[in-house]
């Protein structure tokens, strides 16, 4: 069967094509015309190659790097150590612009990949062969994932207004060029419903287990668990988290191996459900996500800034104070502080007042021994336990929620919780779950949204470039307009049906 080919072999050839396509794509929904529409997608081999090309499109830095800046930098677990001329500073400081480059890059590249997926979805009937249904399911997953990520950045959390706030345009298959250029924004609820429909169909169509660089039934189920959690449909979130946990396909990386989680080749990692795979020839160097977090050698030894990366986004003092409450926490291995040899303390970046401790982060570095190589993890098994824990907490099933939290804490090598610990600490079970999500999923793009979707403020009470007028306190309420980004002005200029966020 053609699906049993080595995907990585085809991916190498398509990656070069995708670079050409992406470098010339227009700032609209329309896909590149570099591929002849009439001759492509006429047989199974064409469709397989085109599908791998779709994966390559959202591996482009315009998508993966810019999206990371948009979802991670507004959190309280990172501190920017110096102002930057790059738009990433505005992402970090909540001073967004409608002409921001990262919002524009992310929007354009996401819809380009959606357009590519739509071409494949539209030519495969639901009663096709199993091989073809698999490919259709993969493209449905891609389309769902990209719409979901877009509405997270440009639309308010579902819980705010029961999904009735403006979301993003839904780009379906079968639309003409004229229709694509006049699509209005759907509501957040409508986008979620579209995402659910695609994922549920993808779950049924995909029957082949594949490497974690590609979609499969379990990958769709994992994203369904996240979507249902964000919708506060706790029963469904638990149901789909259970499907993934009980599938037998995945297992938590043992505690003794946790420090190397992000360094091994993704295919060898049994915990990763889905990642954006970068192979050794796709090292982005100073343009990689990890270059913002780390500078040093391939063994993970921190060195001065600009040795291997910019090294200007650090773990915040707030995060460090929290994780240091448990000195034995194995997750501290993802922090690599730059030490001052003369004092034996963490070096301070003095470009800011007050100076910022340089706690390098290495979750996006050293994959397969290459300093800035990384395959960003989108879904992993630990998150499924924490999704289930949060849904159970919201059903006030304290013992069950704690059991899932304790599974993660045991792996981290720290003390587990009992119900009496909650009482002693004056915390709710939801407090405990969200804290564990913060520790476990730090720097992976979850923290800010976890707070806002649970109606909690973002409090930054530590040094960083957000400091204004000498105050180190920045609080962003969950109802603030700044928690979402502006629709790119280039898109509004091209599509008069789009409305701007306040």
Image (tube, rainbow, N blue to C red):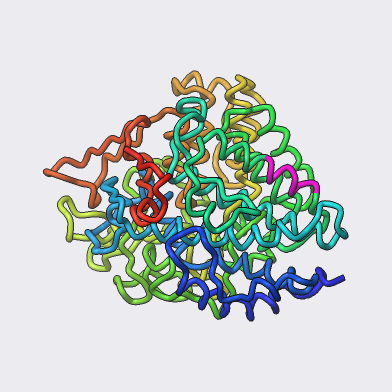
Would residue 248 be found to the left or right of residue 347 on screen? right
Q: Is residue 36 visible?
A: yes
Residue 202 among magenta residues: yes
The rendered magenta stretch, by its main secondary structure, is classed as helix
As drawn, is 134 to the left or to the right of 494? right
Residue closest to the far front: 178
Image quadrant for the C terminus?
Answer: top left
Where is residue 221? Give x, y as percent: 71, 44
Q: Nearer the viewer, residue 9 or 200?
A: 200
Any part of residue 253 in sight: no
Of all residues shown, which one is farthest toward the left? 469
Which quadrant of the structure image shows residue 307? Answer: bottom left
- Residue 343: image x %, image y %? 23, 62
Tally the numbered discs. Answer: 0
Residue occupying image coordinates x 44% and y 62% = 65
The verdict on residue 170 being magenta is no
137 vs 349, nearest the viewer: 137
Near-viewer residue (74 or 253): 74
Q: Residue at x 30, y 55 (%)?
A: 99
Quadrant placement of the N terminus: bottom right
- The residue lying at 60 percent from left, 44 percent from top is 383
Relative vertical location of residue 141 with respect to residue 36 in this rendering, above or below: above
Relative to 76, does residue 158 appear above or below in the rendering? above
Residue 151 location (% of width, % of height): 49, 43
Q: Which residues are magenta?
A: 197-204
Residue 300 coordinates in the image, percent (x, y): 45, 69
């Amino acid at each position: 069967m053609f699906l049993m080919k080595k995907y990585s072999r085809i991916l190498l050839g398509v990656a070069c094509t995708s670079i050409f396509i992406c470098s010339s794509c227009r700032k609209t929904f329309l896909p590149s015309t570099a591929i002849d529409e009439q001759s492509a997608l006429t047989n199974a081999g064409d469709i397989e190659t085109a599908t791998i090309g779709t994966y390559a499109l959202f591996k482009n830095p315009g998508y993966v790097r810019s999206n990371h800046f948009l979802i991670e930098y507004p959190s309280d677990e990172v501190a920017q150590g110096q102002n930057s001329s790059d738009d990433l500073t505005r992402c970090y400081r909540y001073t967004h612009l409608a002409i921001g480059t990262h919002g524009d890059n992310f929007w354009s590249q996401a819809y380009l990949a959606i357009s590519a997926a739509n071409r494949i979805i539209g030519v495969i009937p639901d009663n096709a062969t199993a091989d073809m249904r698999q490919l259709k399911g993969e493209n449905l997953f891609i389309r769902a994932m990209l719409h979901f990520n877009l509405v997270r950045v440009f639309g308010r959390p579902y819980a705010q207004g029961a999904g009735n706030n403006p979301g993003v345009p839904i780009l379906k298959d079968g639309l003409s060029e004229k229709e694509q250029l006049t699509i209005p924004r759907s509501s957040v609820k409508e986008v979620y419903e579209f995402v659910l429909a695609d994922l549920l169909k993808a779950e049924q169509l995909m029957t082949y287990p594949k490497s974690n660089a590609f979609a499969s039934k379990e990958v769709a189920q994992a994203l369904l668990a996240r979507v249902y959690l964000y919708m506060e449909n706790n029963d469904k979130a638990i149901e789909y988290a259970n499907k993934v946990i009980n599938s037998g396909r995945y297992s938590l990386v043992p505690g003794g191996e946790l420090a190397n989680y992000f360094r091994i080749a993704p295919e060898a990692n049994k915990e990763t459900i889905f990642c954006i795979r970068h192979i050794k020839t796709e090292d982005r160097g100073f343009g990689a996500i990890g270059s913002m977090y780390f500078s040093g050698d391939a063994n993970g030894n921190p060195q001065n800034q600009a040795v291997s990366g910019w090294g200007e986004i650090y773990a915040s003092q707030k995060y460090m104070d929290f994780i240091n409450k448990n000195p034995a926490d194995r997750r501290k291995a993802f922090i690599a502080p730059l030490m001052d040899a003369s004092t034996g303390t963490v070096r301070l970046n003095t470009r800011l007042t007050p100076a910022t401790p340089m706690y390098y982060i290495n979750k996006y570095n050293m994959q397969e021994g290459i300093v800035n190589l990384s395959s960003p993890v989108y879904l992993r098994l630990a998150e499924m336990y924490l999704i289930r824990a949060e849904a159970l907490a919201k059903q006030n099933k304290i013992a069950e929620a704690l059991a899932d939290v304790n599974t993660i804490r045991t792996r981290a090598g720290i003390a587990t919780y009992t119900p009496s610990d909650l009482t002693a600490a004056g915390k709710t079970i939801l407090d405990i779950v969200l804290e564990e999500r913060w520790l476990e999923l730090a720097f992976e793009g979850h923290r800010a949204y976890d707070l806002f979707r649970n109606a909690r403020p973002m409090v930054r009470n530590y040094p960083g470039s957000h400091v204004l007028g000498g105050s180190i306190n920045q609080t962003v309420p969950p109802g603030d307009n700044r928690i979402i980004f502006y629709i790119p002005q280039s898109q509004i200029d091209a599509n008069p049906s789009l409305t701007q966020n306040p």
